[in-house]
Image: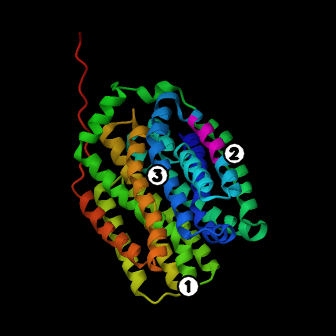
Protein backbone atom coordinates (compact mmCIF):
# COMPACT_ATOMS: atom_id res chain seq x y z
CA UNK A 1 0.00 0.00 0.00
CA UNK A 2 2.82 2.42 0.87
CA UNK A 3 4.50 1.99 -2.51
CA UNK A 4 1.22 2.53 -4.36
CA UNK A 5 0.48 5.71 -2.39
CA UNK A 6 3.98 7.15 -2.77
CA UNK A 7 4.29 6.50 -6.51
CA UNK A 8 0.69 7.48 -7.20
CA UNK A 9 1.09 10.70 -5.23
CA UNK A 10 4.34 11.54 -7.05
CA UNK A 11 2.74 11.00 -10.46
CA UNK A 12 -0.24 13.20 -9.57
CA UNK A 13 2.12 15.84 -8.16
CA UNK A 14 3.91 16.04 -11.51
CA UNK A 15 0.98 15.68 -13.91
CA UNK A 16 -1.33 18.06 -12.05
CA UNK A 17 1.47 20.45 -11.11
CA UNK A 18 2.46 21.06 -14.73
CA UNK A 19 -1.06 21.77 -15.95
CA UNK A 20 -2.03 24.00 -12.99
CA UNK A 21 0.36 26.70 -14.20
CA UNK A 22 -0.98 26.97 -17.76
CA UNK A 23 -2.69 30.26 -16.93
CA UNK A 24 0.78 31.84 -16.66
CA UNK A 25 1.27 31.28 -20.40
CA UNK A 26 -1.91 33.12 -21.49
CA UNK A 27 -0.47 36.60 -21.85
CA UNK A 28 3.07 35.79 -23.12
CA UNK A 29 1.76 33.41 -25.79
CA UNK A 30 -1.11 35.61 -27.00
CA UNK A 31 1.11 38.69 -27.11
CA UNK A 32 3.94 36.90 -28.91
CA UNK A 33 1.69 35.16 -31.43
CA UNK A 34 -0.77 38.03 -31.85
CA UNK A 35 -3.73 35.87 -30.80
CA UNK A 36 -6.83 36.85 -28.82
CA UNK A 37 -7.43 35.49 -25.35
CA UNK A 38 -10.26 33.42 -26.76
CA UNK A 39 -7.77 31.53 -28.98
CA UNK A 40 -5.74 30.49 -25.94
CA UNK A 41 -8.83 29.86 -23.82
CA UNK A 42 -10.43 27.73 -26.54
CA UNK A 43 -7.35 25.49 -26.74
CA UNK A 44 -7.39 24.93 -22.98
CA UNK A 45 -11.14 24.38 -23.14
CA UNK A 46 -10.54 21.65 -25.73
CA UNK A 47 -7.81 20.27 -23.44
CA UNK A 48 -10.29 19.87 -20.63
CA UNK A 49 -12.88 18.35 -22.93
CA UNK A 50 -10.36 15.93 -24.47
CA UNK A 51 -9.22 15.00 -20.96
CA UNK A 52 -12.79 14.22 -20.00
CA UNK A 53 -13.65 12.30 -23.19
CA UNK A 54 -10.48 10.20 -23.01
CA UNK A 55 -10.92 9.57 -19.28
CA UNK A 56 -13.43 6.69 -19.49
CA UNK A 57 -11.33 4.94 -22.15
CA UNK A 58 -8.11 5.39 -20.17
CA UNK A 59 -9.91 4.13 -17.08
CA UNK A 60 -11.34 1.12 -18.93
CA UNK A 61 -7.87 0.20 -20.26
CA UNK A 62 -6.35 0.62 -16.79
CA UNK A 63 -9.06 -1.58 -15.25
CA UNK A 64 -8.52 -4.24 -17.92
CA UNK A 65 -4.75 -4.21 -18.50
CA UNK A 66 -3.36 -2.39 -15.46
CA UNK A 67 -2.43 1.24 -14.91
CA UNK A 68 1.25 0.79 -15.80
CA UNK A 69 0.79 0.66 -19.56
CA UNK A 70 -1.65 3.56 -19.56
CA UNK A 71 0.76 5.71 -17.55
CA UNK A 72 3.64 4.97 -19.93
CA UNK A 73 1.60 6.08 -22.95
CA UNK A 74 0.30 9.12 -21.07
CA UNK A 75 3.82 10.22 -20.11
CA UNK A 76 5.08 10.12 -23.70
CA UNK A 77 2.00 11.93 -24.99
CA UNK A 78 2.34 14.58 -22.26
CA UNK A 79 5.95 15.33 -23.24
CA UNK A 80 5.12 15.47 -26.96
CA UNK A 81 2.13 17.76 -26.37
CA UNK A 82 4.21 20.27 -24.40
CA UNK A 83 6.92 20.41 -27.06
CA UNK A 84 4.41 20.88 -29.88
CA UNK A 85 2.57 23.50 -27.81
CA UNK A 86 5.78 25.53 -27.81
CA UNK A 87 6.26 25.12 -31.56
CA UNK A 88 2.68 25.84 -32.66
CA UNK A 89 2.35 28.99 -34.79
CA UNK A 90 -1.37 28.82 -35.60
CA UNK A 91 -4.48 28.60 -33.47
CA UNK A 92 -5.33 25.21 -35.01
CA UNK A 93 -1.92 23.72 -34.23
CA UNK A 94 -2.04 25.17 -30.72
CA UNK A 95 -5.45 23.58 -30.15
CA UNK A 96 -4.18 20.24 -31.42
CA UNK A 97 -1.16 20.21 -29.10
CA UNK A 98 -2.19 22.18 -25.99
CA UNK A 99 -5.78 21.01 -26.40
CA UNK A 100 -6.18 17.49 -27.78
CA UNK A 101 -2.77 15.93 -27.05
CA UNK A 102 -2.34 17.30 -23.54
CA UNK A 103 -5.95 16.53 -22.67
CA UNK A 104 -5.51 12.88 -23.67
CA UNK A 105 -2.20 12.75 -21.81
CA UNK A 106 -3.78 14.04 -18.61
CA UNK A 107 -6.53 11.42 -18.86
CA UNK A 108 -3.85 8.74 -18.66
CA UNK A 109 -1.73 10.26 -15.89
CA UNK A 110 -4.13 11.71 -13.30
CA UNK A 111 -6.88 10.81 -10.85
CA UNK A 112 -9.08 8.25 -12.63
CA UNK A 113 -6.17 5.91 -13.38
CA UNK A 114 -4.37 6.46 -10.06
CA UNK A 115 -7.52 6.07 -7.95
CA UNK A 116 -8.35 2.77 -9.63
CA UNK A 117 -5.06 1.32 -8.38
CA UNK A 118 -5.50 2.84 -4.93
CA UNK A 119 -8.97 1.42 -4.28
CA UNK A 120 -7.81 -2.05 -5.32
CA UNK A 121 -4.87 -1.94 -2.92
CA UNK A 122 -6.29 -0.11 0.10
CA UNK A 123 -8.79 -1.45 2.62
CA UNK A 124 -12.33 -0.03 2.21
CA UNK A 125 -12.20 1.75 5.57
CA UNK A 126 -9.10 3.69 4.46
CA UNK A 127 -10.06 4.50 0.84
CA UNK A 128 -11.36 8.01 1.46
CA UNK A 129 -8.22 8.87 3.42
CA UNK A 130 -5.94 7.38 0.73
CA UNK A 131 -7.73 9.35 -1.99
CA UNK A 132 -7.25 12.47 0.09
CA UNK A 133 -3.51 11.77 0.21
CA UNK A 134 -3.33 11.44 -3.59
CA UNK A 135 -5.42 14.57 -4.13
CA UNK A 136 -3.27 16.48 -1.65
CA UNK A 137 -0.24 15.43 -3.70
CA UNK A 138 -1.79 17.03 -6.76
CA UNK A 139 -2.27 20.19 -4.77
CA UNK A 140 1.32 20.13 -3.58
CA UNK A 141 2.28 19.86 -7.23
CA UNK A 142 0.48 23.11 -7.92
CA UNK A 143 2.19 24.83 -5.01
CA UNK A 144 5.57 23.47 -6.10
CA UNK A 145 5.32 23.86 -9.87
CA UNK A 146 3.63 27.25 -10.33
CA UNK A 147 6.56 29.29 -8.95
CA UNK A 148 8.96 27.04 -10.89
CA UNK A 149 7.04 27.59 -14.12
CA UNK A 150 6.89 31.34 -13.53
CA UNK A 151 10.67 31.36 -12.98
CA UNK A 152 11.23 29.29 -16.13
CA UNK A 153 9.14 31.69 -18.22
CA UNK A 154 10.90 34.75 -16.81
CA UNK A 155 14.40 33.29 -17.11
CA UNK A 156 14.33 31.20 -20.29
CA UNK A 157 11.24 32.43 -22.12
CA UNK A 158 7.87 30.75 -22.51
CA UNK A 159 8.95 28.36 -25.30
CA UNK A 160 12.02 26.99 -23.54
CA UNK A 161 9.97 26.66 -20.36
CA UNK A 162 7.62 24.29 -22.19
CA UNK A 163 10.57 22.24 -23.49
CA UNK A 164 11.83 21.81 -19.91
CA UNK A 165 8.38 20.72 -18.72
CA UNK A 166 8.22 18.23 -21.58
CA UNK A 167 11.36 16.56 -20.23
CA UNK A 168 9.91 16.62 -16.71
CA UNK A 169 6.75 14.82 -17.89
CA UNK A 170 8.87 11.81 -18.88
CA UNK A 171 9.66 11.25 -15.17
CA UNK A 172 6.17 9.71 -14.90
CA UNK A 173 7.51 6.60 -16.69
CA UNK A 174 9.84 5.31 -13.93
CA UNK A 175 7.30 6.25 -11.25
CA UNK A 176 4.71 4.10 -13.01
CA UNK A 177 6.76 1.01 -12.10
CA UNK A 178 5.46 1.37 -8.56
CA UNK A 179 1.88 0.94 -9.77
CA UNK A 180 2.34 -2.29 -11.71
CA UNK A 181 -0.37 -4.77 -10.85
CA UNK A 182 -1.71 -7.94 -12.47
CA UNK A 183 -4.78 -7.31 -14.65
CA UNK A 184 -6.71 -9.80 -12.55
CA UNK A 185 -6.50 -7.43 -9.58
CA UNK A 186 -9.33 -5.45 -11.09
CA UNK A 187 -11.67 -8.43 -11.26
CA UNK A 188 -11.96 -9.73 -7.74
CA UNK A 189 -15.39 -10.80 -6.56
CA UNK A 190 -18.56 -10.49 -8.63
CA UNK A 191 -17.78 -10.31 -12.34
CA UNK A 192 -19.74 -7.80 -14.38
CA UNK A 193 -19.49 -6.82 -18.02
CA UNK A 194 -18.54 -3.29 -19.04
CA UNK A 195 -21.95 -2.70 -20.60
CA UNK A 196 -23.78 -3.93 -17.51
CA UNK A 197 -21.64 -1.71 -15.27
CA UNK A 198 -22.40 1.35 -17.38
CA UNK A 199 -26.13 0.64 -17.54
CA UNK A 200 -26.22 0.13 -13.80
CA UNK A 201 -24.34 3.35 -13.06
CA UNK A 202 -26.24 5.65 -15.41
CA UNK A 203 -29.60 4.24 -14.25
CA UNK A 204 -28.71 5.09 -10.65
CA UNK A 205 -29.91 8.62 -9.72
CA UNK A 206 -27.07 9.30 -7.27
CA UNK A 207 -24.48 8.68 -10.00
CA UNK A 208 -26.14 11.29 -12.20
CA UNK A 209 -26.29 13.77 -9.31
CA UNK A 210 -22.57 13.28 -8.62
CA UNK A 211 -21.85 13.95 -12.29
CA UNK A 212 -23.91 17.16 -12.21
CA UNK A 213 -22.07 18.38 -9.11
CA UNK A 214 -18.71 17.59 -10.64
CA UNK A 215 -19.68 19.65 -13.71
CA UNK A 216 -19.87 22.68 -11.43
CA UNK A 217 -16.54 21.84 -9.82
CA UNK A 218 -14.86 21.86 -13.22
CA UNK A 219 -16.46 25.13 -14.27
CA UNK A 220 -15.34 26.95 -11.14
CA UNK A 221 -11.78 25.76 -10.66
CA UNK A 222 -10.66 25.91 -14.30
CA UNK A 223 -12.15 29.35 -14.88
CA UNK A 224 -10.33 30.66 -11.81
CA UNK A 225 -7.09 28.78 -12.50
CA UNK A 226 -6.77 29.97 -16.11
CA UNK A 227 -8.29 33.45 -16.03
CA UNK A 228 -7.51 34.82 -12.56
CA UNK A 229 -3.91 35.82 -13.46
CA UNK A 230 -5.20 37.96 -16.34
CA UNK A 231 -8.12 39.25 -14.23
CA UNK A 232 -5.70 40.47 -11.58
CA UNK A 233 -3.40 42.07 -14.14
CA UNK A 234 -6.39 43.85 -15.70
CA UNK A 235 -7.12 45.28 -12.25
CA UNK A 236 -3.61 46.73 -12.02
CA UNK A 237 -1.98 44.11 -9.81
CA UNK A 238 1.48 42.77 -10.63
CA UNK A 239 2.09 39.31 -12.15
CA UNK A 240 3.80 38.32 -8.89
CA UNK A 241 0.44 38.62 -7.12
CA UNK A 242 -1.12 36.16 -9.57
CA UNK A 243 1.78 33.74 -9.17
CA UNK A 244 1.47 33.90 -5.39
CA UNK A 245 -2.31 33.44 -5.67
CA UNK A 246 -1.97 30.22 -7.69
CA UNK A 247 0.73 28.96 -5.37
CA UNK A 248 -1.44 29.65 -2.31
CA UNK A 249 -4.34 27.77 -3.89
CA UNK A 250 -2.02 24.80 -4.32
CA UNK A 251 -0.58 25.05 -0.81
CA UNK A 252 -3.91 25.30 1.00
CA UNK A 253 -5.44 22.66 -1.22
CA UNK A 254 -2.93 20.21 0.26
CA UNK A 255 -4.71 20.67 3.58
CA UNK A 256 -8.20 20.91 2.10
CA UNK A 257 -8.04 17.69 0.09
CA UNK A 258 -6.42 15.75 2.92
CA UNK A 259 -9.05 17.04 5.36
CA UNK A 260 -11.89 16.15 2.97
CA UNK A 261 -10.53 12.62 2.57
CA UNK A 262 -10.12 12.18 6.32
CA UNK A 263 -13.56 13.62 7.13
CA UNK A 264 -15.04 11.23 4.59
CA UNK A 265 -14.14 8.40 6.97
CA UNK A 266 -16.47 9.84 9.63
CA UNK A 267 -19.07 12.12 8.02
CA UNK A 268 -21.60 11.69 5.22
CA UNK A 269 -19.68 12.49 2.05
CA UNK A 270 -22.71 14.14 0.41
CA UNK A 271 -22.79 16.68 3.25
CA UNK A 272 -19.08 17.38 2.79
CA UNK A 273 -19.64 18.01 -0.93
CA UNK A 274 -22.64 20.29 -0.33
CA UNK A 275 -20.65 22.35 2.17
CA UNK A 276 -17.68 22.69 -0.20
CA UNK A 277 -19.79 24.00 -3.09
CA UNK A 278 -21.72 26.42 -0.89
CA UNK A 279 -18.56 27.80 0.69
CA UNK A 280 -17.00 28.32 -2.74
CA UNK A 281 -19.92 30.52 -3.78
CA UNK A 282 -19.72 32.50 -0.55
CA UNK A 283 -15.97 33.02 -1.00
CA UNK A 284 -16.41 34.33 -4.56
CA UNK A 285 -19.15 36.77 -3.50
CA UNK A 286 -17.01 38.19 -0.69
CA UNK A 287 -14.00 38.45 -3.04
CA UNK A 288 -16.01 40.40 -5.62
CA UNK A 289 -17.53 42.76 -3.06
CA UNK A 290 -14.38 43.45 -1.05
CA UNK A 291 -11.80 46.06 -2.16
CA UNK A 292 -9.25 44.37 -4.41
CA UNK A 293 -5.77 44.40 -2.88
CA UNK A 294 -2.90 41.90 -2.88
CA UNK A 295 -3.97 40.75 0.58
CA UNK A 296 -7.62 40.25 -0.44
CA UNK A 297 -6.33 38.12 -3.32
CA UNK A 298 -4.14 36.07 -0.98
CA UNK A 299 -6.97 35.49 1.50
CA UNK A 300 -9.36 34.49 -1.29
CA UNK A 301 -6.74 32.14 -2.75
CA UNK A 302 -6.13 30.48 0.61
CA UNK A 303 -9.87 29.94 1.18
CA UNK A 304 -10.42 28.66 -2.37
CA UNK A 305 -7.37 26.45 -1.94
CA UNK A 306 -9.02 24.70 1.00
CA UNK A 307 -12.02 24.02 -1.25
CA UNK A 308 -10.21 23.55 -4.59
CA UNK A 309 -9.88 19.80 -5.17
CA UNK A 310 -11.46 18.79 -1.88
CA UNK A 311 -14.43 17.52 -3.89
CA UNK A 312 -12.24 14.81 -5.45
CA UNK A 313 -11.82 12.34 -2.52
CA UNK A 314 -15.49 12.27 -1.39
CA UNK A 315 -16.85 12.11 -4.95
CA UNK A 316 -14.63 9.19 -5.96
CA UNK A 317 -15.06 7.47 -2.61
CA UNK A 318 -18.84 7.52 -3.10
CA UNK A 319 -18.46 5.96 -6.56
CA UNK A 320 -16.32 3.14 -5.13
CA UNK A 321 -18.67 2.76 -2.18
CA UNK A 322 -21.74 2.37 -4.39
CA UNK A 323 -20.39 0.32 -7.30
CA UNK A 324 -17.29 -1.44 -5.97
CA UNK A 325 -13.76 -1.46 -7.38
CA UNK A 326 -13.97 -3.60 -10.53
CA UNK A 327 -14.66 -0.65 -12.86
CA UNK A 328 -13.63 2.16 -10.55
CA UNK A 329 -11.26 3.82 -13.05
CA UNK A 330 -13.84 3.69 -15.84
CA UNK A 331 -16.74 5.00 -13.76
CA UNK A 332 -14.50 7.63 -12.21
CA UNK A 333 -13.58 8.60 -15.76
CA UNK A 334 -17.23 9.16 -16.66
CA UNK A 335 -17.80 11.31 -13.57
CA UNK A 336 -14.68 13.25 -14.48
CA UNK A 337 -15.99 13.69 -18.04
CA UNK A 338 -18.80 15.76 -16.54
CA UNK A 339 -16.19 17.76 -14.61
CA UNK A 340 -14.31 18.44 -17.83
CA UNK A 341 -17.41 19.54 -19.73
CA UNK A 342 -17.82 22.11 -16.97
CA UNK A 343 -14.13 22.98 -17.32
CA UNK A 344 -14.56 23.48 -21.06
CA UNK A 345 -17.40 25.92 -20.51
CA UNK A 346 -15.64 27.72 -17.66
CA UNK A 347 -12.39 28.39 -19.50
CA UNK A 348 -14.00 29.08 -22.88
CA UNK A 349 -16.77 31.35 -21.56
CA UNK A 350 -14.15 33.24 -19.58
CA UNK A 351 -12.29 34.12 -22.79
CA UNK A 352 -15.41 34.55 -24.89
CA UNK A 353 -17.26 36.88 -22.52
CA UNK A 354 -14.10 38.84 -21.78
CA UNK A 355 -13.55 39.49 -25.49
CA UNK A 356 -17.25 40.43 -25.84
CA UNK A 357 -17.76 42.56 -22.75
CA UNK A 358 -14.22 43.51 -21.68
CA UNK A 359 -14.89 42.02 -18.24
CA UNK A 360 -14.98 38.71 -16.36
CA UNK A 361 -17.89 39.82 -14.13
CA UNK A 362 -20.62 37.72 -15.77
CA UNK A 363 -18.59 34.52 -15.48
CA UNK A 364 -17.81 35.16 -11.81
CA UNK A 365 -21.53 35.37 -11.03
CA UNK A 366 -22.33 32.28 -13.09
CA UNK A 367 -19.79 30.45 -10.92
CA UNK A 368 -21.59 31.68 -7.78
CA UNK A 369 -25.01 30.48 -8.99
CA UNK A 370 -23.65 27.09 -10.07
CA UNK A 371 -22.07 26.58 -6.64
CA UNK A 372 -25.43 26.96 -4.92
CA UNK A 373 -26.97 24.56 -7.44
CA UNK A 374 -24.28 21.94 -6.80
CA UNK A 375 -24.70 22.20 -3.04
CA UNK A 376 -28.42 21.45 -3.33
CA UNK A 377 -28.19 18.51 -5.73
CA UNK A 378 -25.56 16.68 -3.66
CA UNK A 379 -27.80 16.47 -0.60
CA UNK A 380 -30.06 13.64 -1.90
CA UNK A 381 -27.12 11.43 -3.00
CA UNK A 382 -27.32 7.90 -1.54
CA UNK A 383 -23.99 6.47 -0.44
CA UNK A 384 -24.98 2.88 0.29
CA UNK A 385 -23.58 0.05 -1.84
CA UNK A 386 -25.76 -1.08 -4.70
CA UNK A 387 -26.92 -4.69 -4.40
CA UNK A 388 -25.10 -6.86 -6.93
CA UNK A 389 -26.95 -9.91 -8.29
CA UNK A 390 -25.69 -13.23 -6.99
CA UNK A 391 -24.83 -15.67 -9.80
CA UNK A 392 -27.20 -18.64 -9.74
CA UNK A 393 -25.79 -22.17 -10.06
CA UNK A 394 -26.52 -23.80 -13.40
Q: In terms of secondary structure, where does tag 2 sit?
A: loop
| Residue 24 relative to residue 216: left or right | right
Magenta segment, which residues?
A: 70-78
Q: Is residue 359 above or below residue 114?
A: below
User: How far across and how far down the image is residue 51, in percent?
Assistant: 50, 49
Task: Note whether residue 252 is visible.
Answer: no
**First along the sequence among labels 1 and 3:** 3
Q: Residue furthest bottom?
A: 291
Q: Earlier in the sequence, mark 3 or mark 2?
A: 3
Q: Which residue carries the number 2 mark?
A: 170
Q: Are marks 3 and 2 in contact (CB under 8 Å)?
A: no
Pointer 3: what residue? Answer: 49
Crowd class of label 3 (few under 14; some 14 to 19; many from 20; radius 10 Å): many
Residue beneath the point at 75% across and 66% down: 157
6 in magenta: no
The picture places residue 103, in percent across and down from the top left corner, at 54, 49
Amino acid sequence: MTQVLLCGAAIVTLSMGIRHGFGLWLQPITMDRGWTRETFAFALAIQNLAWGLAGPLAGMLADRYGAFRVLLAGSVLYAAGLVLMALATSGLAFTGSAGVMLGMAQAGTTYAVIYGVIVRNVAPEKRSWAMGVAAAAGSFGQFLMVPVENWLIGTWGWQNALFVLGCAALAIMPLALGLKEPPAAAHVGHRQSVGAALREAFAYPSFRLLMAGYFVCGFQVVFIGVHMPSYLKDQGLSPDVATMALALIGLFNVFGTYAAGSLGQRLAKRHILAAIYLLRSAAIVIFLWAPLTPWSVYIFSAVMGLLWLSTVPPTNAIVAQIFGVQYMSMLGGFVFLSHQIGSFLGVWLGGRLYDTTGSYDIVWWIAVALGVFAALINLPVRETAIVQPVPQPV
